[in-house]
Image (cartoon, rainbow, N blue to C red):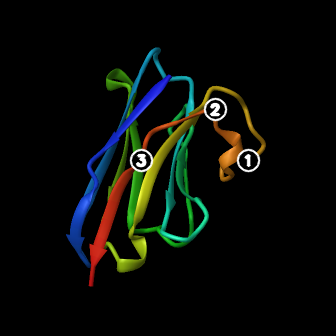
Amino acid sequence: VQLQASGGGLVQAGGSLRLSCAASGRTFSSDHMSWFRQAPGKEREFVATISRTGSTYYADSVKGRFTISRDNAKNTVYLQMNTLKPEDTAVYYCAGTRYYRSSYINTGAYDYWGQGTLVTVSS
């Protein structure tokens, strides 16, 4: 599976962006999908995840502000980001796996990754 992330850009604090991650190569409806982010000088960190059945889970830092969703007909997963803060500035990556994992918040759980899209939030 190949993933193409898009939708990043420059936004003022308090603004919104919607990221998209389009999958190709095969249908991903049975895959578990997630978003991670990596700020300059920091490790890649978990943001949000969505199961095959649509169950979601979020990092505490984005809970209530970000929403992950998927459209299996379009082979696309989304991340709606509202009330953005300067500390949300990072390169955002989508990732997926077709396998069951005991945890989906670690980068090692994923088999394939997108190339990343840069989100910059100005104060």
Label 2, residues with CA under 10 Å away: few <14, some 14-19, many ≥20: few
Mark 2 vs mark 3, CA separation in Å: 15 Å
Q: Mark 2 points at which residue?
A: 111
Please state the horizontal and vertical placement of residue 118, each as a whole percent of the image.
34, 57
| Residue ID for mark 3 | 116
Of marks 3 and 1, the one in the foreground: 3
Check disc 2 and give the amino acid type: Asp
Above or below: residue 84 compared with residue 19 = below
Name the residue: 74% across, 38% down: 101
* In the image, farthest residue toward the front: 41
Label tally: 3
Mark 2 or 1 closer to N-term?
Answer: 1
What residue sits right under mark 1 in the picture? 103
Lateral position of residue 116 relative to residue 18, left or right: right
Q: Of helix, strand and loop, which one carries label 2?
A: loop
Residue 100 appears left or right of 68:
right
The CA span between labels 2 and 1 is: 14 Å
Q: Nearer the viewer, mark 2 or mark 3?
A: 3
